[in-house]
Image (cartoon, rainbow, N blue to C red):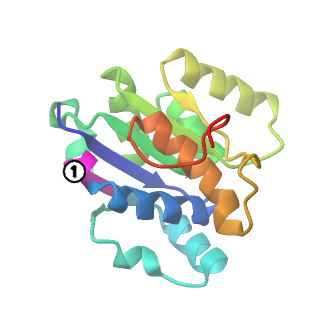
Amino acid sequence: MENKIVVAITGASGSIYAKLLLDRLLDLKVQWSELGIVMSNNAKDVWKTELGNEDYRDFPVKYYDKNDFTAPFASGSAKYNTMVVIPCSMGTLGRIANGISDDLVSRAADVILKERRKLILVARDMPYNLIHIRNMESITLAGGIICPATPSFYSQPKTIEDVAGTVVDRVVDLMGLEHHSFRWGLS
């Protein structure tokens, strides 16, 4: 099966995670055949605030409007097999958990879940309230993966990009892509 990936970027804080994932996916281009991006308006504002640029426009990938229900990954017949929402706001997570397909992000996630494919939500809010936890439980029970944007420090990261990269490395692992990263117990 071809490796078709959709990345959704929401307005939660953590644009660096999305940027690093897109960088990594472009480096791993031989491992996927299609990459679609859907980015909310809030995500664009947060990116500009946090990263001080609008470089998301420079990635050589296909972008889809958040209301474009004609995007291929809005249907299971397009056979997109992996979706990552990075960063994932709790509002988006809640809509996905409750089957509310009111935009392309939530519709694509619904399709991924119904087709029993891989959905990875990089949750970026804290602390969690009981509603968040129950929504995460619902997504987990439906087959999705909750991957909180919680960095590791085993690799002794030196920069903010290195710290954020520990989360992105984990996401890439969860996507099933081969890449070089720090591995515990290996020198």
Q: Is residue 36 magenta?
A: yes
Q: Seen in the image, is 76 located left or right of residue 123?
A: left
Q: Position of residue 69 (x, y in %)?
A: 26, 48
Q: Position of residue 143 (x, y in %)?
A: 48, 19
Q: Is residue 58 above or below residue 103?
A: below
Q: Is residue 150 magenta?
A: no
Q: Residue at x 75, y 46 (%)?
A: 154
Q: Bounds of the magenta span?
A: 30-37
**How many labels sit on residues?**
1
Q: Nearer the viewer, residue 80 or 107?
A: 80
Q: Residue at x 27, y 46 (%)?
A: 31
Q: Which residue is mark 1?
A: 34
Note whether residue 86 is visible. yes
Note whether residue 13 is visible. no
Q: Seen in the image, is 37 located left or right of residue 150?
A: left
Q: Position of residue 7 (x, y in %)?
A: 40, 51
Image quarter where the N terminus lies is top left
Instruction: Name, please, the residue furthest toward the front.
Output: 187
Q: Is residue 89 above or below residue 43?
A: above
Q: Position of residue 171 (x, y in %)?
A: 52, 43
Q: Is residue 9 above or below residue 57?
A: above
Q: Nearer the viewer, residue 144 or 169?
A: 169
Q: Seen in the image, is 75 located left or right of residue 10?
A: left
Q: Residue at x 73, y 48 (%)?
A: 125
Q: Residue at x 63, y 51 (%)?
A: 166
